Image (tube, rainbow, N blue to C red):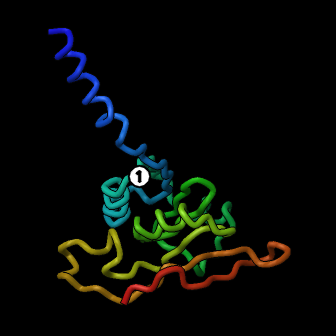
Amino acid sequence: MVGIAASIALTAIPALTSTPAKIAVEVWKDPNCGCCGDWIKHMEDNGFAVTAHDSGNTAMRAKLGLPARLGSCHTALVGSYLLEGHVPASDVHKLLKQKPKALGLTVPGMPVGSPGMDGPDYGGRKDPYEVLLVTRNLMNSDVSTSVFTSYR
């Protein structure tokens, strides 16, 4: 009997330890924004543990050094990277794997069809958009962007 119990316990251990740890993401958003909540759910469904602050994101975006022209409705931090707007979880995983020297990723505005902007209210519409990699310019006086992923 003890041998069977031990055997069952040993086969259960790999299942418990093989689940990857969730990656922490901290988000600043407007408390009344539905699309921000939908983006958070998208992130949670894709391996992220999200902590949300319902205090708006303008001050945090400025503190992190992202110009308003690249802004959206929520700002997040994952590791040492900034995420602005409706960045797909797959791009966040790609960013964390590649580890570029960058400020982070942004999807300026609120493109329909991006994660969080893709619910039934939009009737299946998917507008093209780009996820931009944001890097600091020399002397940290401004930022530059390049296309990280294009969704067409």
Quadrant in the picture for the N terminus: top left
Residue found at the very far top of the displayed protein: 2
Q: Position of residue 55 (x, y in %)?
A: 50, 53
Q: Position of residue 146 (x, y in %)?
A: 60, 84
* Few, some or many residues within 10 Å of mark 1 (<14, 14–19, 20+): many
Q: Closer to the camera, 72 or 107?
A: 107
Quadrant in the picture for the C terminus: bottom left
Q: Is residue 123 left or right of residue 95?
A: left
Residue found at the very far left of the displayed protein: 1
Does dot 1 land on a helix, a strand or a loop? strand
Residue at left offset 53%, top offset 62%: 97
Q: Closer to the camera, 30 or 89?
A: 89
Q: Position of residue 83 (x, y in %)?
A: 53, 65
**Is residue 72 depicted above or below 48 in this figure?**
below
Q: Closer to the camera, 97 or 6?
A: 6
Q: Closer to the camera, 9 or 77?
A: 9
Residue found at the very far right of the displayed protein: 139
Residue at left offset 66%, top offset 62%: 64
Total marks in image: 1
Instruction: Identify the residue under disc 1.
Output: 48
Residue 133's quadrant in the figure?
bottom right
Q: Is residue 2 left or right of residue 47?
A: left
Residue at left offset 59%, top offset 81%: 69
Q: Is residue 116 left or right of residue 58?
A: left
**Is residue 108 depicted above or below 52 in this figure?**
below
Residue at left offset 77%, top offset 78%: 137
Badge 1 amino acid: Phe
Q: Position of residue 24 (x, y in %)?
A: 48, 48
